[in-house]
Image (spheres, grey):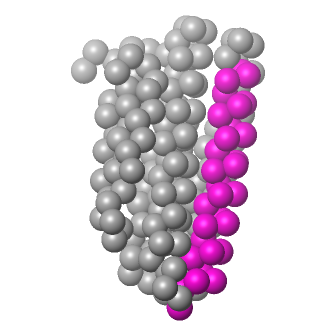
């Protein structure tokens, strides 16, 4: 499965899920902004790292441990949404609707990940085990891609509000 999510200019994230849990998570460049002290960017990267840890846990540990890494993904998402909420009042009103919609989508993505985790745990001793694990990984990657979309929406709003510094590196 490939999902490309466009953002600013030529900003994309490519996430490829291969059979049997081999996957590639390759972020392409975000907006060319100075990321010094950018909590939204840091929290998106933290969420992506949590998704990668989930991938490793699913492959290497028993189903009872899935909840720990899904909880880590959820806590990372909560932190990301909190950092977006902190900056939201400074952004143009026209951007808030898109950003808030993306936040709601991320919450739905997390709910889907939790449902897939439960299915994977329930079917861990059945012939559906591998399929359920794959669906769980797909749900986690969808969440990571949508987090990148949130970052792009926040970046665009910051640029409209002239709240960012462009990086020339």
Q: Is residue 111 magenta?
A: yes
Q: Position of residue 10 (x, y in %)?
A: 34, 21
Q: Is residue 73 above or below residue 68?
A: above
Task: Tell me if residue 166 comes above or below residue 120 in the rendering.
Answer: above
User: In the figure, is residue 155 to the left or right of 165?
Assistant: right
Note whether 163 is above or below 115 in the view shown.
Answer: above
Q: Is residue 145 left or right of residue 150?
A: left
Q: Residue furthest bottom?
A: 125
- Which residue is more in the foreground, 63 or 49? 63
Give the image quarter of residue 40. top right
**Quadrant housing residue 23:** bottom left
Location of the C terminus (image quadrant): top left
Q: Is residue 68 visible?
A: no
**Can you give x and y, in whole percent of width and height, for residue 90 in the image?**
70, 18
The verdict on residue 88 being magenta is: no
Q: Position of residue 17 (x, y in %)?
A: 36, 56
Residue interval drawn in magenta: 96-125
Residue positioned most to the left = 169
Work out whether residue 154 or residue 8 is closer to the camera in this orientation and state it. 8
Residue depicted at 53% across the width and 88% down the height? 126
Would you say 86 lies left or right of 2 here?
right
* Rendering quarter of residue 85: top right
What is the x, y in percent for residue 149?
52, 33
Question: Across the whole image, how many numbered discs are drawn on residues?
Answer: 0
Q: Magenta part mainly helix, strand or loop? A: helix
Side of 64 where 7 appears, left or right: left
* Point 28% across, 15% down: residue: 168
């Amino acid at each position: 499965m490939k999902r490309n999510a466009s953002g600013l200019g030529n900003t994309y994230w490519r996430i490829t899920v291969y059979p049997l849990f081999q996957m590639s998570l390759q972020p392409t460049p975000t907006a060319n902004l100075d990321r010094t002290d950018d909590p939204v960017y840091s929290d998106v990267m933290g969420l992506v790292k949590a998704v990668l840890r989930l991938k490793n846990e699913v492959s290497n540990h028993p189903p009872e441990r899935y909840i720990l890494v899904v909880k880590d993904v959820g806590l990372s998402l909560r932190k990301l949404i909190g950092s977006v909420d902190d900056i939201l009042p400074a952004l143009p009103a026209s951007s808030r609707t898109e950003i808030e919609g993306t936040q709601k989508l991320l919450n739905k993505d997390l709910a889907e990940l939790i449902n897939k985790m439960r299915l994977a745990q329930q079917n861990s001793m059945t012939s559906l085990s591998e399929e359920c694990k794959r669906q769980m990984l797909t749900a986690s990657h969808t969440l990571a891609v949508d987090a990148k979309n949130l970052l792009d929406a926040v970046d665009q709003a910051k640029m409209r509000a002239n709240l960012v510094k462009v990086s020339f590196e």
